[in-house]
Amino acid sequence: MISVLETVKFLSVHRTFLILLCILIVFLFYGNSSPLVDQDEAAYAGFSRSMLETGDYLTMDFAYSLPHRKPPLHFWISSSLFQIFGSTEWVLRLFPALCILGTSLLTYHLANVIYGSRTALYAFSILSFSLYFPLNGKIALVDSLLVFFGMVGFVSLYHWIKSKKRIFVLLFWLSVSLGLLVKGPPILIFLGGTCVLLLSVNQIRSQIWKLNPFLFLPIAFVPLLLWGYFSWQKDNGSLIQWMLDWYIFRRATDPVFGQSGPPGTYLMLFVVTLFPWSRLYLSFLNENGWKLIAYLKTEGLGVIKNLLPWHWEKSDFIFTSKRFLLLGLVFSWLFYECLASKLPSYPLSAYPILAILLGDQLARKHNQIYMYRLYLTVALLMIAIISFVLLPKFSEMRTDTKKAASVIQSLVPKNETLYSFGAHGIPSFAYYYHRPIREITWEEIQITKGYFLVSESDYTVWKGLGIDWEEIGEPLPIYAYDRNKKLTLRLVKTKGL
């Protein structure tokens, strides 16, 4: 019989890491054939499949998906994978899962370089087995690709400062360039903002300037600008102008999709999303909060002077790994606390940095081994419940649109366009319907003949107004979990068709 002591010896730091890595891989790739999430994921899948089918890799045209358009790299990758492996849900989620896995490995690597293998194991565990971060590998959103490129750039920046090897300059700017082609400004906010703050450290200021931003930043923009140029030529600039308004001007001043919150929203949100490691996070806030208060008491109004770039030449800050990590949090987290719009994915790049800092927080506790095993046990139990109970249940809820699409496919002739009106648009329905859908206005409804998908309430009103429609089939109930309500849709057609 294997003794407890022998078990402990077997579970060395490196063996524990390999076991947890295998568990993470299984979690990320298991059960990814479930129906698409109704909004963002289905819209991205629709863009990718449409690009493959039409051969047009500039146009983002998919029913109900106007507000989900992004720079195209994520769609190009998904479309390529569809071409190689087929357009299935599992294939769609393959690359996001790989990106989250890659980000976890980069986090382990950076923590190992800075603090050693034990703290790296803690950081890997905190990031990979917390409530929110690993779930980004099980849904095909652009954020998983963005956080991967952000971490590549952040790790490359650290290695450039420490080793002065030119390869890391190239990796840094490559990550910026590809990140711009994924989601635009966020990669510049994170990596560019971090570089600006690092200029406050005299010891490495010349090293930061040797990144040659005046040369390499314009080069990094080239892929995005080329795509923007060809896109502008194709649609006379309508897509680019819409993106500038929707993703830059509006989000800085107004909430989107009704999701807003005051400064401090993410500060509180991390307590939940980092579960079951939340106590470490609160301990980290407590320790560094008191340090900040003591610093403010000592410096007084002089703190404001230290924030001004023209005073940095006189500052005596030295470079430390912890300062590097803390400065990385400013533009991966604190910046987004100031925006009116609040989406859970905005501070995603902060999670790897927080995981390393919390790993260090745990490593400095006298009972670290006991606490780590306790938290990890809860985390693995949570992952098991998510994998085998919650996700299958959630998958059942997502079958409504797939079933509705199948029913309507059988009722509408293959060569007919389905007309849609109202606020019931669900991209996942359009993806599974896989036939032309055209959204129309109230004025167009009165002069258009054909097949219409309308809400039950709209149908009742319009029937009372005397619109000449004929019911087809039974009403179709769909639970729209993004709105937390059930929609009842009805298929109708113009009489006489």
Image (spheres, rainbow, N blue to C red):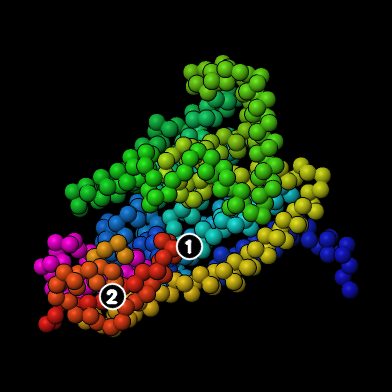
Residue 394 drawn at (x, y percent): 51, 69
Q: Is residue 53 visible?
A: no
Image point (48%, 40%), residue name:
262
Q: CA distance from mark 2 to mark 1?
A: 29 Å
Q: Along the line of sight, which residue is nearer the eye, 116 or 286?
A: 286
224 displayed left or right of 383: left
Q: Which badge, 2 or 1, is on the more N-terminal residue?
A: 1
Q: Is residue 107 above or below residue 383?
A: above
Mark in the foreground, 2 or 1: 2
27 displayed left or right of 169: right
Q: Is residue 268 visible?
A: yes
Query: Which of the image's four quarters has the C terminus?
Result: bottom left
Image point (33%, 62%), residue name:
47
Query: Which of the image's four quarters has the N terminus?
Result: bottom right
Q: Secondary structure at mark 1?
A: loop
Residue underneath mark 1: 139
Q: Amino acid at mark 1?
A: Ile
Residue underneath mark 2: 490
Residue 428 drawn at (x, y percent): 37, 68
Residue 471 counted in the magenta span: no
Residue 482 drawn at (x, y percent): 42, 61
Q: Along the line of sight, which residue is nearer the eye, 442 or 224?
A: 442
Image point (67%, 60%), residue name:
379
Dots 2, 1 in contact, CB < 8 A: no
Image point (31%, 60%), residue name:
65
Q: Which residues are magenta?
A: 426-455
Q: Amino acid at mark 2?
A: Arg
